[in-house]
Amino acid sequence: MKFTPPFQSATLIRRYKRFLADVELPDGSAITVHCPNTGSMKNCNEPGSRVWYSTSDNKTRKYPHTFEMIEINGTHLAGINTNRANHLVRELIEKGKVPTLSGYASLRHEVNYGKEKSRIDFLLQEHPDETGRACYIEVKNVTLGMGKGLGLFPDAVTTRGTKHLRELMHIVSQGDRAVLFFCVQHTGIKRVEPAVEIDPEYSATLNEAANAGVEIMAWQAKLSAEAITLVREIPVVLPPG
């Protein structure tokens, strides 16, 4: 995913009201940018950090600038725009980079499904007429780096995420494939684990889902102001249970 023009840099003043952040520009002035992240952004919202933002040409937007990336401890980059995750995963699948997700005839997104009235991020199907065995893919953005290569998900309690795991388990029970895809937009994360202390219910349900046959994978992104690309698969480590 390439960006034209590239993201612009600034310094984070503060993130607040969940969807807003104030940043200081190189000339010393300040602007308010939209923050497209519903999580806590734990370890990704330190005031004084270098950040990057994009600018929309949509004149109807109240906040035309969007918070995209942040530098962590002057070392790593994290992409906090969760809206980018689905685009990155779709790009990877359509380029045939994930062998286990290749060979399907159709790909649809945001399809209604499940017992709990959910929408799946991607639905792959064997035949052009959208028949045959299906593969349901749920995407989650990972940015919570804990150091020494460890990344955790989620960064806040997610009842919605737990619901999605139940839906994926039901899909497997019906004979189709279900995949949980961790899109790791953090250059310092080398493996992903469930955040047991943050959301023990999600962590327990993730273990249950894995045991039920839900496939779990994670890919790490390379990030810059010019482009973000998923470049390598990394391990997902689940605790015993």
Image: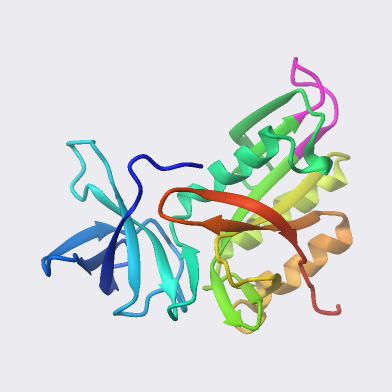
Evaluate whether residue 88 shows in this view: yes
Left or right of 58, for residue 206: right
Q: Is residue 130 magenta?
A: yes
Front position in the image: 138 or 29: 29
| 152 w.r.t. 120: above or below | below
Left or right of 187, for residue 9: left
| 127 w.r.t. 9: above or below | above
Determine the residue positioned at 80% across, 61% down. 209
Front position in the image: 125 or 58: 58
| 17 w.r.t. 173: above or below | below
User: Please, which colouring scheme is shown?
Assistant: rainbow
Q: Position of residue 199 (x, y in %)?
A: 61, 76
The quarter of the displayed image where residue 202 is located? bottom right
Q: Position of residue 235 (x, y in %)?
A: 77, 66
> Which residues, given as a range, are shown in magenta?
125-135
Q: Is residue 68 magenta?
A: no
